[in-house]
Image: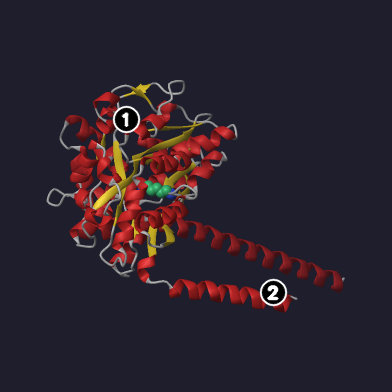
Amino acid sequence: MKKFLRIAVFAAALFAALSVSAKERNQILKVYNWSDYIAEGVVEDFEKWYFEQTGEEIEVIYMTFDVNESMLSKIENGHEDYDVVCPSDYIIERMLNTGLILPLDFSALGNTPNYIEANRSPYIEKMFRAINPDIDANLYSVAYMWGTTGILYNTAFVTREEASTWDVIRNPKFSGKILIKDAPRDVYGPVLIYLKQDELRKGAVTLQDLMMDSSDESVEAVKNYLLEVKPGVCGWEADLGKEQMTKNRAYVSLNWSGDAKWAMGEAESVGVSLDYVVPEEGSTVWFDGWVIPKYSKNTKAALYWINFLCRPDIAIRNFEEMGYSPSCGAPEVLEAMIDEELYAPVDLSYFFGEDAKAVCVDPVLFPDMSVIERCALEHDWGRDTEKLLSMWQDVKGSRASAATYIVIAAVVIAAAAYFAVSAASKRSRRSRKRR
Ligand code: N2P
């Protein structure tokens, strides 16, 4: 029986492999997205919709990543043939500058409605223009989710005032309970803003200047600050931090608004109270957008994919499940977020137009204009990126070696103690024998 089962499993695997390879490449769409970044069933629904729209079969091969830089390196160095990927703003900038992405050709949509252009928010349009002054990024990329970087905190242990400064990550009160996002740019920006707050206040530098600042002096200053923070850090996390927070294992997390929103919802259901704040000193605002890399082998289905995700009902499904703020500026999206019992009015005119001057929407998802005004867009550092990545490795790596030293020291002490005890007991056995 067991043998029969093995043969059946083998035959099924072989059949699956053959049927994939039998497919033409234009019947396959390779999507490379962040993990935990799409609602259940959306991929399958896209496959059905694509067939309805084009009469062509499509099979999505869906792959995920956790770190922008590792995704980029697969394309930049590995020339992988992903059809559509979802980098953050400063990576889109780099891909634009290095000619790694193709312009979007909306005529490929034929008679299918163009949800991308119909629902573009004025804010997204403006911020994407700011990605590169010479090339309009709106012609090459379409925002998917966006948000701020801030502090997610446990209200039982941390006050809102304590969480309202970036220095909370160095506060000895929370030592051992601090999580830092494993995203070098998203940590560098806020720390530099914190360190330069006096200059910012005096107007000697602007937030935008700091987003471009890759000077040795600033990288060194951020590194030294992070080395001071490190002893209190219980994890440098890509995706697991939100669970650590809902389980009360950590109290402070430097995180993205979307992870924060998801964690706050989860925490509530298990009786833990979390909140999120964008520190007073200022912060970064980020955008993840879809692009079609130049090594794509199915640009048509890639464009349909992007278009499908901009359909308002799909955007709503995604944000309701994941907690990330949709970039789709459709009125239906705003409508779906309004809750007059739960939220005080915020000014979202920057995103949804003048009618949204006072709407009751969760400010974690869509911050008031006053918060947006103290947030800046990160920029690509070009060649200096290496400097940032090696600083990051130095900061995180020395933590590992410190831990390693402690383990080695413990082993040496234990071995020495063992030999000392066994030598002593041998001696006493010998002296007993002599007696
Ligand atoms: C979700 C990843 C979000 C990316 N797991 C934020 N830039």
- Residue 418: image location, x then y, percent: 68, 65
- Residue 230: image location, x then y, percent: 42, 48
| Residue on which the image places disc 2 | 5
- Residue 142: image location, x then y, percent: 28, 49
Say which element carries label 1: loop
Question: Does 223 appear above or below 356?
Answer: below
What residue is at 37 percent from the left and 35 percent from the top?
A: 333
Residue type at mark 1 is Glu
Q: Nearer the viewer, mark 2 or mark 1?
A: 2
Residue type at mark 2 is Leu
Q: CA distance from mark 2 to mark 1?
A: 62 Å
Judging depth in this view, the residue of 350 and 286 nearest the camera is 350
Judging depth in this view, the residue of 309 and 281 nearest the camera is 309
Judging depth in this view, the residue of 83 and 220 nearest the camera is 83
| Residue on which the image places disc 1 | 280
What residue is at 23 percent from the left and 62 percent from the top?
A: 100
Q: How many marks?
A: 2
- Residue 124: image location, x then y, percent: 25, 40
Quadrant for the N terminus in the image: bottom right
Tell me: 268 left or right of 159: right
What residue is at 19 percent from the left and 62 percent from the top?
A: 99
Task: Classify 10 Å Cα crowding around label 1: few (below 14), some (14-19), many (20 and above).
Answer: some
Task: Classify 10 Å Cα crowding around label 2: few (below 14), some (14-19), many (20 and above).
Answer: few
